[in-house]
Amino acid sequence: MNSSNELIQETVPLKSRIWVSIADAACAMLNTFIVSIGLTYYFTSYRGMDPSLAAVVWLMFGVWNAVNDPLFGYISDRTKTKLGRRIPYIRYGAPLIGLIFFMSWVNIGGVQASQSLMFIQMLVLLFLFDSLYTAIATSIYVMPFEMAISNKARGSIMIWKLIFAVFPLAVPLVLWGFIRPEPGTSANVFQWIMLGFGLVMAALIFVSTYFYQEKHFQQEEGQLPFLKSLKACFTNRSFIVFEVISFTVIYVQTALMLGLNYYLAEFELPAIPLYGALAVGILAGVILFVNVRDRWGIKRATMFMAGVFSVGCFLILGLGRQFLPALVGFFSFGIGFAGGMYLIPLMNGDVVDMDEHRTGLRREGMYAGVNSFITKPAISLANSAFLWFLSLYNYNFAGLAGTQSEGAKTGILLGWVLIPGILLGISFLSLFLYPLAGDAWEKIKGDLALGHAEKERKLLESKGIRYE
């Protein structure tokens, strides 16, 4: 080991922080187009696929979607290459996910192919896309822990990831509103744009891997047996309560982004002010939660987020045909989205802290995989439920924008915000059972911080890095 006067402070280069955040945002934008906004509309409304078949696709996909995350996390933790454990999946998966993204918009068998062919195409491509997305996105998610040892250096990466998180939320929504193909029209321009978008995003992900690197010594660390790790997660009470809000946030974000363009296409309300209210709500939410985080605590701040989000959903449900209530509802959505992006990861960190307090082990990767195992079916359920409401209220999937009946409009509102509003209300109530709050919890966190500091000092100095 180097002597103490030779130790240097650990830093992560600015280019590394920015490029891993770019990769994270690019991967998320591809996923948003596929699972939240475009694929269901493209196959059912534009190509004429039976909505009940599309719902079956999403339900079948939900099974795989729940399993592949913990499975991949288990495999990647044990990967050993010269590039590291994560970078090979990011670098070599990027071209493949770009190709599958484009193929999702190719009309195999023609625009109105047989129902069987469209079912197979949608199912196969969705499975392939999500497998690649899981490999890439999970690897990017844990990269800050591979790139740095100290919490200070890792925190500098997280700030940039939060800044770039705005793009996956805004870009797909705005772009889709301009390029969405109407039934009966040519999709050539749309397909060329999707090709270009997929290529650019894949290129950004690929190129990013040349600007950051892993701490390879982590490949040598031991790993717990899979079943033992799984059991420890489900005996953590705080994790069970956390999963209620985590599942809800995934469901709500998917449902709201999926239904937004249906809503704006059928209700004669100006889109720009509504988008503006959403953006202002997001900004206000971030400012609010950053400032009240320590004063209120994560538990109370998350309860506030869930309550406001739920009220916004029911406001849209009851008065969403009118401009001013819709404006307030969109502002509430913005606060909810901000809370989902900012508070949920912090709560997840507390849950892992409690696990460490109970087991003496630090297991972020396993918790991330199990969390996805529970929450990812929410994506399929949100898509299936929305299609079910549209079908129940006789939505004309082949109709042009602005031509739906009043009944179909009611179906849009119900499919869009009813279940999210209910789930958010349940989450608000469940958080009363969340145990990680108060003086006792703060003492536990303080003890953990002291333990981390000592472990970090020894590890940094063993690598020739000064601890500060």
Image (cartoon, rainbow, N blue to C red):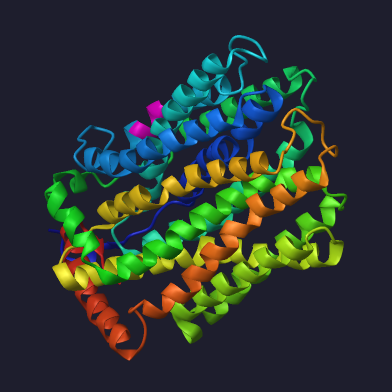
Q: Residue at x 66, y 54 (%)?
A: 414
Residue furthest out toward the bottom: 439
Q: Which quadrant of the figure contains the N terminus?
A: bottom left
Q: Is residue 223 visible?
A: no
For residue 144, side relative to residue 30 (left or right): left
The magenta region covers 89-94
Q: Residue at x 42, y 73 (%)?
A: 430
Instruction: Point out residue 119 in the picture as x, y percentages from the top left corner.
Output: 52, 22
Q: In terms of secondary structure, what is the magenta stretch mainly?
A: helix
Instruction: Point out residue 311 in the picture as x, y percentages from the top left corner.
Output: 65, 71
Q: Is residue 387 visible?
A: yes
Instruction: Point out residue 116 in the picture as x, y percentages from the top left corner.
Output: 52, 16
Instruction: Point out residue 331 in the picture as x, y percentages from the top left corner.
Output: 72, 66
Q: Which quadrant of the figure contains the C terminus?
A: bottom left
For residue 186, side relative to residue 88 (left or right): right
| Front residue of 213 and 250 | 250
